[in-house]
Image: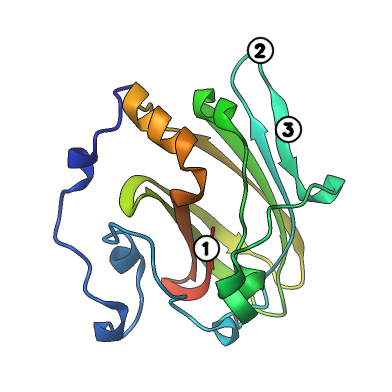
Amino acid sequence: MAAVEYEQWQDGPPAPPPEQMQEITPEYVNLLMAPTEHFLCELEHNIYNIQFVNFKIRCLDAGQERVLFDLGAGDLPSPPPPDIGENACRFIRYHFGPEFLGIQTIGTTLEFTNGEHEARDFRMIERHYFRDQLITSYDFTMPFVIPNTRNTWEMIYTKPEFSDEWKEALMTSPWEVRSDSFYFVNGRLIMHNRA
């Protein structure tokens, strides 16, 4: 895999500001080239009552398989920044240390419950940034979620390969890595979390 260079992420026009959008769509969030400054939907948009109840992150590199973070086992994320306020429930902060940069394949297991409505095309788009530059994006879809169920969603991430210069910058400024996770049902934004 080639090293990530910033220029390769400059394709396409920039996204218009959210206030100019009638509705936040998957196409819109895929145009974002920097982390959002605000949450792009209200908590009330989650009409499906989807609740995340457990989360685990693992290294899947051959011969190095191990759990990196397991909320169900009592691991706690780092505290959110003080200015996040009442949206702290939609913000998570991790610090995995510099050895994380050497991992090529990550697996996540997300457990969630769904309310009384079925959810078709439950889609998660994650955008990861460093110093306001997009470094990678992931897009996963679960075709159907049965109402009133507890579900497990396994996702596999292949991380980009970074040049030594990028690795050094990431190691010396870990809190400048940010991400947005957008959750859609039938193409409508219902949740937005930030890290």
Spatial CA span between label 3 and label 1? 22 Å
- Sequence-earlier tag: 3 or 1: 3
- Of badges 2 and 1, nearer the viewer stands 1
Q: Residues within 10 Å of mark 1 (few under 14, many from 20)?
A: many
Q: The residue under label 2 is which amino acid type? A: Gly
Q: Residues within 10 Å of mark 2 (few under 14, many from 20)?
A: few
Kind of element beneath mark 1: strand
Image mark for residue 194:
1
Residue sitting at x 59%, y 87%:
44
Q: Which residue is mark 2?
A: 63
Q: Are marks 2 and 1 in contact (CB under 8 Å)?
A: no
Total number of numbered discs in the rendering: 3
State how far apart marks 2 and 1 are (Cα). Answer: 31 Å
| Relative image position of residue 144 (x, y in whole percent) | 58, 62
The furthest residue to the front: 172
Residue under numbered circle 3:
67
Horizontal and vertical percent for residue 25? 35, 72
Q: Is residue 56 left or right of residue 192?
A: right
What numbered label is drawn on residue 145?
Answer: none
Q: Is label 3 in a helix, a strand or a loop?
A: strand
Could you tell me how far apart the alpha carbons at marks 3 and 2 are, in whole angstroms? 13 Å
Quarter that holds the C terminus? bottom right
In this picture, is 145 found above or below 135?
below
Query: How far from the left and from the top, in percent, is residue 88?
Result: 64, 72
Residue 160 showing in the rendered view: no
Residue farthest right in this picture: 73
Q: Amino acid at mark 3?
A: Val
